Image: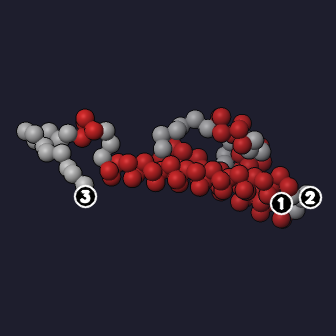
């Protein structure tokens, strides 16, 4: 059974209790989505790193990695993280992937 605190004089008690249940659920979804996007980046970069040779197969892996990195960057920005320098370094995102995202 859940209990809701009463509102006094039109002011809710949410400020005293922290996040509302909906806010907590939204935050949990953001965290889960960010984690999933990060794991996808790791998997794509691992496939790219283990690929030997050039050609169309490598370009497909680069495109796939660029798509995953782009989605991860967007998800990070939706969570309020604007800088990606640390992520680029930590994940060791190759230059060829970053170029596909428009980096110079």
Please, which residue is most extreme toward the right here?
Answer: 53
Q: CA distance from mark 2 to mark 3?
A: 61 Å
Q: Is residue 78 visible?
A: yes
At numbered mark 3, what does the secondary structure look like: helix, strand or loop? loop
Please, which residue is most extreme toward the left here?
Answer: 9
Badge 1 local density, few (<14 within 10 Å), some, or many (20+)? some
- Sequence-wise first label, 1 or 2: 2
Q: Residue 53: where, in percent of width, then height? A: 92, 58
Q: Residue 13: where, in percent of width, then height? A: 20, 39
Query: Depth-wise, is mark 3 or mark 1 nearer the camera?
Result: 3
Query: Depth-wise, is mark 2 or mark 3 nearer the camera?
Result: 3
- Sequence-wise first label, 2 or 3: 3
Q: Are marks 1 and 2 in contact (CB under 8 Å)?
A: yes
Please, which residue is most extreme toward the front here?
Answer: 1
- Sequence-wise first label, 3 or 1: 3
Quadrant assignment, res 15:
top left
Residue that label 1 marks: 58
Q: CA distance from mark 1 to mark 2?
A: 7 Å
Q: Are marks 3 and 1 in contact (CB under 8 Å)?
A: no
Quadrant containing the C terminus is top right
The tag on residue 53 is: 2
At numbered mark 1, what does the secondary structure look like: helix, strand or loop? helix
As drawn, is 59 to the left or to the right of 101?
A: right
* Closer to the camera in the image, 67 or 51: 51
Residue 15, relative to residue 74: is it above or below? above
The tag on residue 1 is: 3
Q: Residue 75: where, in percent of width, then height? A: 53, 49
Residue at 75% of width from left, 52% of height from top? 45
Q: CA distance from mark 3 to mark 1?
A: 56 Å
Quadrant assignment, res 17:
top left
């Amino acid at each position: 059974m859940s209990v809701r605190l009463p509102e006094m004089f039109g002011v809710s008690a949410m400020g005293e209790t922290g996040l509302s249940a909906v806010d907590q659920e939204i935050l949990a979804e953001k965290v889960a989505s960010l984690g999933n996007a990060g794991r996808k980046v790791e998997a794509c970069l691992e496939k790219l790193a283990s690929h030997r040779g050039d050609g169309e197969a490598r370009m497909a892996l680069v495109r796939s990695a660029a798509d995953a990195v782009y989605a991860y960057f967007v998800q990070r920005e939706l969570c309020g993280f604007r800088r990606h320098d640390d992520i680029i370094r930590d994940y060791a995102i190759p230059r060829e992937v970053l170029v596909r995202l428009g980096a110079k």
